[in-house]
Image: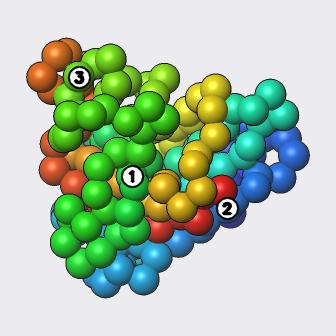
Amino acid sequence: MTALAASLAVTATLGAPAPDVLVQERFGASPRTAITYDTRSIPIGSRVVVLERREPDGGTSVALWLEGVQPLRTFGAHVHQKPCGPRPADSGPHYQHVKDPVQPSTDPAYANPRNEVWLDLTTDDRGEGGALSSVRWRFRPGEARSVVVHEHATQTHPGHAGTAGARLACVNVPFI
């Protein structure tokens, strides 16, 4: 499936009207829009699509589609506060609707899929996969700037909640 076909398929799963934000990029070695830090897992030239839709009820839906990445693998993915940079940590912590006063946040009361946008996915044998997350809130302007793809599925237990291993790739997204 091409990235464009994937974006249309993901748009359909969001309930149809065009997304408010659409990013379609290829991962590269430098931080223009999409950067890979682990070329074995997220090869240079692999594709990413991110869609954001502001729901009429005040909520937000975010969809992620990856293409050409490591096949048959589960990745964690989350919305982060800062834009991508040359170092994996440049994207900062996860965006949280209610901010945990203790950082890094690993308390399940804050680090959970109702308070953050979690987009964990498992790729098929062609290295394609996608995820959709819907939350009951909207992003604060300028505080959500990227989606980071992580090494493994997101943990949920106390002391590790919200963690998903190393940051493998990042894509800048102009969330609204």
Distance Cα–Cα, label 1 vs label 3: 17 Å
Give the quadrant of residue 20.
bottom right
**Mark found first going from the N terminus, 2 or 3:** 2
Q: Residue furthest left?
A: 159
Give the labeled residue for mark 2. Answer: 22
Depicted 124 relative to depicted 57: above or below: below
**Mark found first going from the N terminus, 2 or 1:** 2
Residue 85 at x, y = what percent?
A: 30, 75
Circle 2 Cα neighbour tier, 10 Å, few/some/many (<14 / 14–19 / ≥20): some
**Disc 1 and disc 3 in contact, CB within 8 angstroms:** no
Mark 2 residue element: strand
- Mark 1 or mark 3, which is nearer to you? 3
Q: Would you say 148 lies left or right of 167 here?
A: right
Give the labeled residue for mark 3. Answer: 107
Locate the C terminus and report the quarter of the image it occupies.
Answer: bottom right
Residue 21 at x, y = what percent?
A: 69, 59
Give the quadrant of residue 121.
top left
Residue at position x 49%, y 54% from top?
Answer: 144
Residue at position x 47%, y 67% from top?
Answer: 172
**Disc 2 and disc 3 in contact, CB within 8 angstroms:** no
Residue in the foreground of this view, choosing between 46 and 35 = 35
Q: For the residue marked with disc 1, what is the amino acid?
A: His
Q: Residue furthest front?
A: 101
On residue 145, which mark appears? Answer: none
Q: Is residue 117 visible?
A: yes
Depicted 41 relative to depicted 125: above or below: below
On residue 80, which mark appears? Answer: 1
Q: For the residue marked with disc 2, what is the amino acid?
A: Leu
Q: For the residue marked with disc 3, what is the amino acid?
A: Asp
Circle 3 Cα neighbour tier, 10 Å, few/some/many (<14 / 14–19 / ≥20): some
Residue in the foreground of this view, choosing between 102 and 81 = 102
- Mark 2 or mark 1, which is nearer to you? 1
